[in-house]
Image (cartoon, rainbow, N blue to C red):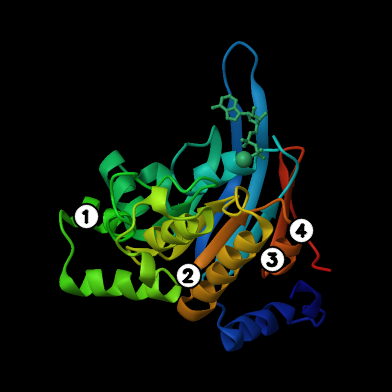
Amino acid sequence: MRDEMHSANGHVATEALDASVSLPPIVVETQGLKKTYGGKIAVPVLRGIDLQIRAGTFVAIVGQSGSGKSTLLHMLGALDMPTAGRVLINGVDLATLEEDELALLRSEEIGFIFQFHHLLDELTCLENALMPITIRHGTETEEQRARVIRLLQRVGLEPHLHKRPGEMSGGQSQRCALVRALANAPKIVLADEPTGNLDSRSGKEVFALMHEVNRASGVAFVMITHDDRLAQAADRIFLVENGVLQEVEKK
Ligand code: ADP
Ligand code: MG
């Protein structure tokens, strides 16, 4: 967009352009984000990351193992705190929040999916998917329950609502974990190699469902992946390397 600012009054022109395009709001932002793991020998992992993710964007994060992808995702989700710099969720600087406010923000605004589904063995698929609502409200309303069941239907789990994780396949369990991440209708889903533990067919299915949810509901996704084909299907791709983040052109 900066390239458009050639005229003398380029500044005005750019503002007009922004207004006419009316970009979706920024839901996740980092400013000069740094993370160093301590101990006797300091290990700088992230050396200054500036990132802006707008509502509804599907972002893929790629990079070598050990480059700091999970570290970054954990800080976006307020699961860990930066050594320096800021993380803003919907414009709110996480450093300004008390622990209970952070917990509320995590449960209201952010859904998490990890490589392993982390479903509770003794609960059914439906009970697992309802868990974030149960934790937040004590119990779920009929409406919330109906909404979660609809989501489970949408990811093809209707026949498995009352099965326990031990009776479901890896792909089914991960689809259940996807619905659990969406249970509180978050604006952002953070996914750390969500397909990394699945065979390629189930991985593609889970990814396709994440994409479908993203397109249908405008939830922003930030997904770490090793799979270049999945990354290519995202709206934007970022590479973590040598502690910095750079956007990668899509092929
Ligand atoms: P990635 O997800 O890209 O594989 P990570 O973010 O998990 O990488 O880790 C980045 C680097 O930080 C690695 O060298 C890892 O060993 C180190 N690291 C991660 N978590 C911790 C921690 N809690 N304490 C110390 N070092 C850590
Ligand atoms: Mg990782």
Residue 25 visible at all: yes
**How far apart are the two marked residues, 1 and 2, measured between alpha carbons?**
21 Å
Q: Secondary structure at mark 1?
A: helix
The spot of residue 69 in percent (x, y) is 64, 43
Check disc 3 and give the amino acid type.
Answer: Arg
Badge 1, how many Cα within 10 Å: few under 14, some, many 20+?
Answer: some
Q: The C terminus appears in which quarter of the rendering?
A: bottom right
Q: Residues within 10 Å of mark 2 (few under 14, many from 20)?
A: many
Q: CA distance from mark 2 to mark 4?
A: 22 Å
In three-dimensional space, the C-alpha distance between marks 1 and 4, rounded to whole angstroms, equals 37 Å
Vertical position of residue 156 compared to residue 53: above or below = below
Residue 236: image x %, image y %? 69, 66
Residue identifier under label 4: 228
Confirm or reject: label 2 Cβ below 8 Å from ligand 2: no
Q: Earlier in the sequence, mark 1 or mark 4?
A: 1
Residue bearing the label numbered 2 = 219
Residue ID at (70%, 69%): 233
Please report the residue visible at 29 percent of the width from the left and 74 percent of the height from the top: 147
- The image shows residue 118 at horizontal and vertical percentages of 42, 44
Foreground disc of the pair 2, 4: 4
Q: Residue at x 32, y 63 (%)?
A: 184
Q: Residue furthest bottom?
A: 20
Q: Which residue is mark 3?
A: 236
Horizontally, residue 3 falls left or right of residue 187, namely right
For label 1, the residue is 134
**Helix or strand or loop: what does disc 2 sit on?**
loop
- Contact (Cβ within 8 Å) of mark 1 with mark 3: no
